[in-house]
Amino acid sequence: MPLPLLAAVAGNAAGVFSYNRANFLHDSGQRVQRYYTGLSYQMQLFNLYRQDIRDLVGLTTEKMTNYHVVACLELGMICTLLGPARLPSTVPEWVLWHQLTCLCAAFAFLVASMWLATRAVVVAGSFNVRLQTQYIRLPLPDDEMLDEALTKADDFEGRDLGGMLRIPFLRTLWQKVSPWAPAEAAADPEAGDVTRDVPRSTAVQADHNSHLRLYQHLQKKWACYDAYARVTMSMGTYWLIMSMAYYEIGWVLCNQGKGLPAIVAASLFTGILILLIYLDVFVGRVELILVAGLIVAGPALVASGASVREADEVPWQAVAAGVAHALLACWLWHAGTLVPGKTDLPAKFKGVSYLDIFGPIVQELQKVLDRTGIAFGGAQNKRPVSLKDAKAQLQSTLEGQAVSDRNEARNLSKAVQDARRAGVSPKDEHLQAAERALERVALPKEMQNLRRVLADWKASEVWNHFDGGQQALVDRMSADLDFMLR
């Protein structure tokens, strides 16, 4: 072989070798960078998991702190009524008995609420630490994983001769123009794609809701304390309000001898108690009427018996009021019992129903949001149900435009995006009308921005560099914009 030809072949081979080696080193650098980037994202994801657990446990601790504050305030009121503000000795003993019975019941329930709330905080905090330290750990790589991500320069020497002397673009061109090129040739391992061999972390890589399911499982350990802290605080408040009704009867009716103010005050307290039960407990109309009758019966019977002013003997109204109290206590006991099922909690109380933030109520709310379309465009970015629904939403948005320009632009923009994502034809009359309306809404904003730019020009040093014709043109444009924006 002639020497010049040999030199030309050797020079071209050296150039191809240098190109493939540089390409190999470049891919190796991208391989390492891709690995570290993926590891960084993975650590951020696990940090998000840990923050989710802290936020969920923080719901319990924050609520229990609020329960402590409310229970302490009510306990202070009870201690005042038992001590300095107690009823005088002129009040009949049986009236005082009813008032003290309600106060002691309220005291017992509120103390139980504080104890249960403290217990819930302790258990929730313990399981939070357990989750953070044993289950949801950051996926830190070991030395072996880091070494697998590295590629040395001498690894290029382990490739075959065809890979070292691969002519650039020749294989790609052959795959495009040749009908005999195999379809799987695009997946050739020597094409330079080395990122698919990046080692994965050995940390637990479950789906994004696995830590939430783990939290739901562990939440059952303190859910009973949380639920009954709410229930006992409600019951303590009920008996405290009932004792206030008896207090007004004893102080105003028995001590001062004024019947009408005592009846009005007792009626207000019993009405507040009935309203609280209606707001706190899932109760039917008939059941609510019966419970309201038991609540009103106690103060009404005591007031009627105290009006007779037979302080030496116990009237029959006092016994009947005691029976009404016993029946009311039995009903509260029934309302606070466990409801068999998946939760095994006193589900008749409405506050307990919101204890599980992933429960049926949240699922029903999500169904409502999906059905009404309010949740569309959010984090889940769900598609509309059908093309017909998208057109109906677009038409309803056009027919009922918002009052302010800002709301109108936002509603029109959302409707147009939903219609395009659902596949509505660009020639659809409603879509074209919405786009024209969106342009009309956005035009004044663009004109205001242009007027602001012209005003900035006049106030800056750029204005001094304009000649007379340019300044006159800017002034005329500003005047036209002012006229159109009026």
Image: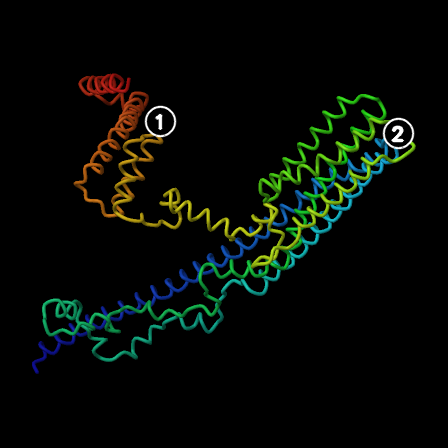
Real-space Cα distance between discs 1 and 2? 71 Å
Mark 1 belongs to which amino acid?
Ser
Left or right for 362, reference 397: right
Q: Is residue 182 above or below residue 87?
A: below
Foreground pick, 123 / 425: 425
Quadrant, the N terminus:
bottom left
* Contact (Cβ within 8 Å) of mark 1 with mark 2: no
| Image quadrant in which you'd find residue 418 | top left
> Given the current orientation, which residue lies at the most extreme bottom position?
1
Is 106 positioned to the left or the right of 160 in the image? right
Q: Residue furthest right?
A: 312
Categorize mark 1 by other alpha carbons within 10 Å: few (<14), some (14-19), many (20+): few
Name the front one of labels 1 and 2.
2
x then y, percent, for residue 335:
65, 48
Which mark sits nearer the N-terminus, 1 or 2? 2
Residue 350 position in % (x across, y down): 59, 45
Q: In the rendered image, which residue does mark 2 sit on?
A: 310
Question: In which quadrant of the rendered view does residue 461 lie?
Answer: top left
Q: Which residue is mark 1?
A: 404
SS for tag 1? Answer: loop
Viewer-closest of 238 and 118: 238
Q: Residues within 10 Å of mark 2 (few under 14, many from 20)?
A: few
Count of numbered badges drawn on the protein: 2
